[in-house]
Image: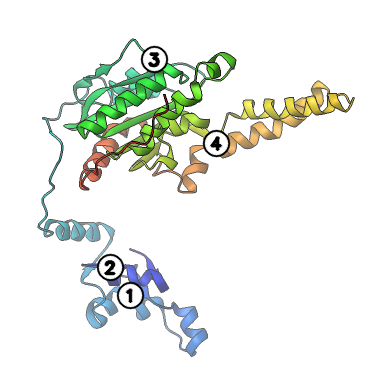
């Protein structure tokens, strides 16, 4: 559909079947500027490596497309002739539409991430028939876990309803173990500020309980798909299967934010450190100085925590319309289930 130059030329040349769009696609080891510099020859991109040349003379490409739509039609015909049947390792059921319209998601979540919402309302607008068999509903209730189906495929859903405590982390670990044992794909719906902090929680073992969940996520070999529907901060990104934990796909909603911590929190931490340092030196740290220090930090976090900043650097697989979440998840599950699922072998869960 476009230019394939130098090493990029080998992509279509090594394919089973290649399609090229006339007056648009080109394939050459060296483009016109390089050819002129190396040999002195002047030649247009079309004459050097266009569709007419490669379909009629060189034989590098196999199919001649008139435009992009024609090229996609030819690609579908090629796939139809692959003689491949997907062998599913999961059960399927007839597809049911959710009971509630997807466009209600805009009002449920919204752009203000400080406003609380129930992740079950999101689940009800994504899963088949809005049916959700919740697991441990009254324990560790800041994490919602349960079984459902999306386009007939079984899924285990893990969604945030607040900060992660020891109880919610252990609940998540238990649920991930069940899904791995039953070969059920996992869907993570992220809206998480992180794991709870403070003396009481450290004494209660939040570090090792959080590590249990992170271990389970890291080791799980069932297909994992993550959607950032709100905030994604700190170790909460780890526990909810952020990019470093190898989800097959990771998508972001336009309202989502991702960073090590929120801009306000980062600014406050750095301001506190500076204030303490000045106090030790016997120097004053005024409110005006604190505000001046915080302002650029908050602005930078806001800019770099944007999903567009993230997506532009390929840290995710794209920003999706919330109303399209169900369709995108269905397509992603279908794609992921083409590959055989490896047996999960967990590491050590510290007790």
Relative side of 343 to 290, left or right: left
Mark 3 vs mark 4: give the one in front: 3
Answer whether labels 1 and 2 touch (C-beta < 8 Å): yes
Compared to residue 136, the image places residue 316 above or below, namely below
Across and down, in percent, residue 260 comes to 56, 34
Identify the secondary structure beneath mark 1. loop
Label 2 sits on residue: 20
Across and down, in percent, residue 75 comes to 21, 59
Across and down, in percent, residue 150 comes to 22, 31
Answer whether labels 3 and 4 touch (C-beta < 8 Å): no
Q: Earlier in the sequence, mark 3 or mark 1?
A: 1
Relative side of 345 to 194, left or right: left
Residue 332's image quarter?
Answer: top left
Q: Earlier in the sequence, mark 3 or mark 2?
A: 2
Answer whether labels 4 and 1 touch (C-beta < 8 Å): no
> Residue 50 bears which disc, if any?
1
Label 3 sits on residue: 140
Identify the secondary structure beneath mark 4. loop
Mark 2 vs mark 4: give the one in front: 4
Identify the secondary structure beneath mark 3. loop
Real-space CA distance between mark 3 and mark 1, rounded to the nearest whole angstrom: 61 Å
**Residue beneath the point at 41% across and 16% down:** 167
Compared to residue 116, the image places residue 74 above or below, namely below
């Amino acid at each position: 559909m476009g230019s394939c130059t130098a090493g990029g030329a080998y992509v279509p040349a090594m394919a089973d079947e290649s399609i090229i769009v006339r007056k648009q696609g080109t394939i050459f080891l060296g483009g016109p500027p390089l050819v002129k510099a190396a040999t002195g020859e002047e030649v247009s991109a079309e004459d050097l490596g266009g569709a007419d040349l490669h379909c009629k003379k060189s034989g590098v490409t196999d199919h001649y497309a008139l435009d992009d739509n024609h090229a996609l039609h030819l690609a579908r015909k090629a796939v139809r002739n692959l003689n491949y049947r997907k062998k599913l390792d999961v059960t399927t059921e007839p597809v049911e539409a959710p009971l509630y319209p997807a466009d209600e998601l805009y009002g449920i979540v919204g752009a203000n991430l400080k406003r609380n919402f129930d992740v079950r309302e999101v689940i009800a607008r994504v899963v088949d028939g809005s049916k959700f068999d919740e697991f441990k509903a009254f324990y560790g209730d800041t994490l919602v876990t349960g079984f459902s189906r999306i386009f007939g495929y079984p899924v285990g859903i893990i969604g945030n309803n607040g900060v992660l405590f020891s109880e919610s982390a252990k609940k998540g670990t238990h649920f991930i173990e069940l899904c791995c044992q039953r070969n059920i794909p996992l869907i993570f719906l992220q809206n998480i500020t992180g794991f709870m902090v403070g003396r009481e929680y450290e004494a209660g073992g939040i570090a090792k309980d959080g590590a249990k969940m992170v271990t389970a996520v890291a080791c799980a070999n069932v297909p994992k798909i993550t959607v950032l529907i709100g905030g994604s901060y700190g170790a909460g990104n780890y526990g909810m299967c952020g990019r470093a934990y190898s989800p097959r796909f990771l998508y972001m909603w336009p309202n989502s934010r991702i960073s090590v911590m929120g801009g306000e929190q980062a600014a406050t931490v750095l301001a506190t450190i500076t204030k303490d340092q000045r106090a030790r030196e016997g120097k004053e740290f005024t409110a005006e100085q604190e505000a001046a220090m915080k302002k650029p930090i908050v602005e930078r976090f806001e800019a770099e925590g944007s999903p567009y900043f993230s997506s532009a650097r390929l840290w995710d697989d794209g920003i999706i319309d919330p109303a399209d979440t169900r369709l995108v998840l269905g397509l992603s599950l279908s794609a992921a289930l083409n590959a055989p699922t490896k047996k999960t072998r967990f590491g050590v869960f510290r007790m």
